[in-house]
Image (tube, rainbow, N blue to C red):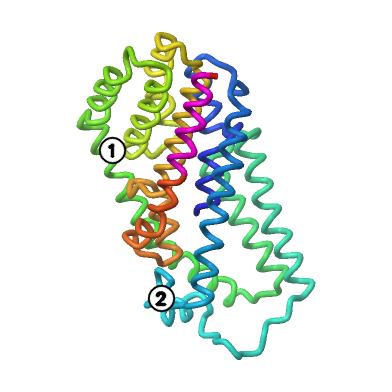
Amino acid sequence: MLGAGVGTLGSTINPFATVIASDAAGVPFTNGIMLRFGLLAVCWLACVAFVMRYAARVKADPQLSIVADKRESNETHFLKGKREGDAPVTFTGTHGVILVIFAASFGVMIWGVSVGGWWMAEMSGLFLVAAIVVGLIARMGEEEFTSTFVDGARDLLGVALVIGIARGIVIVMDAGSITDTILYWAEGAVNGLGQVAFINTMFGLQGLLSFLVPSSSGLAVLTMPIMAPLADFSNVDRSLVVTAYQSASGLVNLITPTSAVVMGGLALGRVPYERWLKFTLPLLGVLIVIIMVGLSLSAIA
């Protein structure tokens, strides 16, 4: 989840965040790309160091894991009853072919979304076909295939319910005009500020709005037409506002409980939300400092 989050935070040509926000701000999406590359590299290194430090500590003492108390139930769930000391599974040519199909499915999905105009229906069809092809290659019988498929769907049922609840919170906020009220207040908060103060205040406001609107494309369409023109009065390039928006959105969407990715991912990984917060908060502090330094230096450059 940290890997996906830092990729979104420092995304350079993300069509659902960078491109949509740049279009709404009236600037080419390539403007500011070097700063985004820099933020991506530095934040990625920070995440790698954070994860590897945690991994080394847990390797030395498994009780330091944030889910140490769930080890037995997690082994039962993820290993399907296998234990340390059992006969290892031999990697075969069939496994290799299945992994290639798995990777190719994501390649086709990326092409479909970015070029072919695909969305949920097409992606669902792609993975359903991929699952059937994998079942045929693995020579699974009809009963084994359907049982395995249903077991996988059962694991995702709780995730689907969590995503539905998270989406419901957003709908309530939109229907009650809560988001519009906060956006109106945010516009007044950044008006007339200096360059450094403006861009860092913008970063903070986008973080707040990202908490309320977890959809990156929705937030871009909602805020950029209002916030980007304000940058002209503070002599800040509009592309920097786009970077502040996507950085804040990527950062907050690592932890916001209204994000389907966060809640769904935690449900799949069987990690309680409060433990995820405890785990990520120190890293979030480091990432915030990195982003604010990058935005401030670019604002005065």
Q: Is residue 292 magenta?
A: yes
Using a 10 Å C-alpha cutoff, classify the residue at mark 1 as few (fewer than 14 neighbours), some (14 to 19) or many (20 or more): few
Whether residues under marks 2 and 1 lie with C-beta atoms below 8 angstroms apart, the answer is no
Q: Where residue 252 appears, x then y in whole percent?
A: 39, 42
First in sequence: mark 2 vs mark 1: 2
Q: Where residue 183 appears, x then y in whole percent?
A: 29, 24
Q: Amino acid at mark 1?
A: Ile
Which residue lies at the image location 79% right of the left edge and 72% below the top edge?
93
Task: Give the residues drawn in magenta, as a range.
Answer: 287-300
Q: Which residue is mark 2?
A: 68
Residue 52 placement: quadrant: bottom right
Which residue lies at the image location 46% right of the left edge and 43% below the top edge?
287
Q: Which mark is residue 171?
A: 1
Main SS, magenta residues: helix
Residue 205 placement: quadrant: top left
Which residue lies at the image location 54% right of the left edge and 72% below the top edge?
148
Q: CA distance from mark 2 to mark 1?
A: 36 Å
The single residue placed furthest to the right in the displayed view is 93
Q: Where residue 150 appears, x then y in whole percent?
A: 49, 69
Q: Answer above or below: position of 112 versus 198.
A: below
Q: Amino acid at mark 2?
A: Ala
Q: Which mark is residue 76?
A: none
- The quarter of the image holding the C terminus is top right
285 left or right of 172 in image: right
Using a 10 Å C-alpha cutoff, classify the residue at mark 2 as few (fewer than 14 neighbours), some (14 to 19) or many (20 or more): few
Q: Is residue 87 magenta?
A: no
Which residue lies at the image location 50% right of the left edge and 23% below the top edge?
240
